Image (spheres, rainbow, N blue to C red):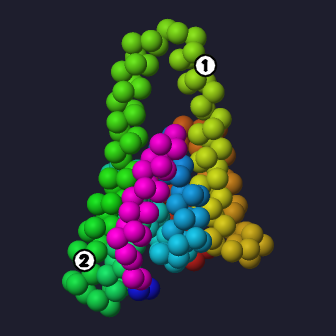
Amino acid sequence: MSLALTGADWLALLTHFLSLSLLAVGGAITTVPDMHRYLVDQRHWLSDSQFTSSIALAQAAPGPNVLFVALLGWNVGMNAGGGLGAGLAAWPYALLGVGIAMIGILLPSTTLTFVAARWGHQNRERRLVRAFKQGMTPIVIALLIATGWILAASHGSSIKNWPLWLLTGVSALLVWHTRLHLLWLLGTGALLGWLGWV
């Protein structure tokens, strides 16, 4: 995929990620549905497979959860630089995409978190602070479910891919009701995918 991004497009990417940063309650992964809407559906800067592959690769890699934002920025920049066929000439655009995406997603939330955490710690016994923490729990859970739905829906019909949906449901139940480490579930999913069962 090859794009021609202007300075206004790069600024739009930055401002969109700046706004998403303030909505990332529960982590950047909760903003995936809107990132998909913006990058894939609205702007057509990424293909659906580039989007889901970026998230899957980042989630499988060790490191912070926010790595997927860097990969999304990398792919937008790589597409703006002419795609993989452009070779090293596309790398400056890819690095620009990484920088813009990461600054956009990290700067507001980091600043807000620092200020709010200091205030919340100083006022942790107030009823308002406790109520806010309890009220945010269902919102974060709903955002995580929406993220899972977007990622799972990209695989098509639920009838055709019933083993994938079954694996997703079983994994969700195991996480909810047991203390089984997530790496076991990831490893099982990877093995079943490698065997071609899902």
Extreme right residue here? 159
Q: Is residue 144 left or right of residue 1?
A: right
Give the residue at x 64% y 72%: 155
Gap in angstroms between the C-alphas marked 2 and 1? 47 Å
Give the residue at x 53% y 52%: 31
Q: Is residue 90 left or right of residue 189?
A: left
**Amino acid type of disc 1?**
Ala
**Badge 2, how many Cα within 10 Å: few under 14, some, many 20+?**
some
Residue annotated with mark 2: 91
Quadrant of the frame with the C terminus = bottom right
As helix, strand or loop, the secondary structure at mark 1 comes to helix
Label annotation for residue 131: 1
Give the residue at x 53% y 72%: 43
Disc 2 + disc 1, Cβ < 8 Å? no
Residue nearest the observer in this picture, 23 or 154: 23
> Which span of residues is magenta-colored?
3-25
As helix, strand or loop, the secondary structure at mark 2 comes to helix
**Amino acid type of disc 2?**
Trp
